[in-house]
Amino acid sequence: MTSADRTATAPVNGLTTLKLSIWRGAEEGRFEEFEIPAEDRMTVLDAVTIVQRKLDPSLSYRFACRVGVCGSCAMMVNGTPRWTCRTHVSKVVRDGQITLAPLRSLPVIKDLATDMSAFFEKNEKAGGRFVPSQEGHRDIVSVDPKSRQRKRADAAIECIGCGVCYASCDVVAWNKDYLGPAALNRAWSLVNDERDGDKAGHLQKVAVDAGCHACHSHQACANNCPQMLNPTASIAGLKREIFAAALKGEL
Amino acid sequence: MAQRMELWLYVVQRLTAMILAPLVLLHLGVILYAIQGGVTGEEILARTQGSLAWMLIYGLFVLSAGLHGAIGLRGIVRELLGWNGPSLNLAALCFAAGLIWLGLRALGAVT
């Protein structure tokens, strides 16, 4: 175990030191133990940064904004995917210990950094691209904020693409082709975008074998989403729309 | 083609679920009502034999349950065992046909 010098003054949950068990390596690897001073209001990302700066500069992890906007610092914290920059150590520490691992269901590049290509490619595969309904320069389309569609879209936007839902999802873990909660949630926001010109196209792209019908409604995505989104509800919405569209002969 | 079939299997499963939900409640309700003071084979047959209404209700029940169960089982087998393709579709079809045949046979015996 490697320990950092104690500089803390205010302990976390009565602890003066924090033990971190951190995944080292790629797909094959092991957990390595570190001990750092526990500091008041410390986040999990702070703890990882202390390890990297003071104990082992070779530790790889990913972060950018540190304020819950960029979605790049997600990792498995005691087995649960979380955005580490907004997760206080005091909330997740168990017996003075935290276990950190790379996000589940994504290939590990090194240590805590995963290759998120598959996650982002599935956004594209699920038709997550806005299709304009008008060509050329037109006036800005007015969307009634009280309309049913706008309310549905509202509930699905603000995803930061952190991959927490993807790592939470058991169906993703079972079926590597499954589009996943984030991509399907994005598709739902476009299906409800009154400016989008290809609703049937969006539905078609997710009404596939490993699309929305593969969801088991476990709700782990909704449970762990740091933005409090509910991809399970979005997926249920897609299923309803697809059902209706199929009966109307639109698909 | 395969994607279209998956879509329609989903639609059929959802439709049959919509049919089965009230029918199951009706079925349970009749059991609770009929069982009061004991139930005999004669009682059941007296209610069902020659009744077009019961025949239609349970006929619909059997068809829906056969399709719904087979589609659901097909999905479980695919996920759990990784079995896929035409052989699984054929097996699911046989399962549906078997369930429907057994159900209709039973229906024929009591109506």
Image: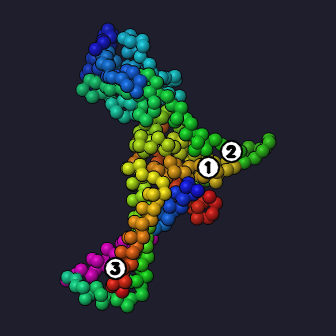
Nearest the viewer among A247 and B59 is: B59
CA–CA distance in space, label 1 to label 3: 45 Å
CA–CA distance in space, label 2 to label 3: 54 Å
Question: Which colour assignment does the render follow?
Answer: rainbow
Give the SS element for disc 2. loop
CB of mark 1 within 8 Å of CB of mark 3? Answer: no
Q: Is residue A180 magenta?
A: no
- Residue drawn at x 43%, y 35% is A105
Q: Point out which mark residue A202 bears.
A: 1
- Residue drawn at x 36%, y 30% is A77
Q: Which residue is mark 3?
A: B106
- Residue drawn at x 41%, y 16% is A59
Q: Quick check: can you spot residue A45?
A: no
- The chain ID associated with circle 2 is A
**Marks 2, 3: nearer the viewer:** 3
Q: Which residues are magenta?
A: B17-37
Up/down of A4 relative to A221, above or below? above
Dominant secondary-structure state across the stretch colored magenta: helix
Q: Which residue is mark 2?
A: A131
Residue A39: image x %, image y %?
34, 18
Q: Is residue B26 magenta?
A: yes
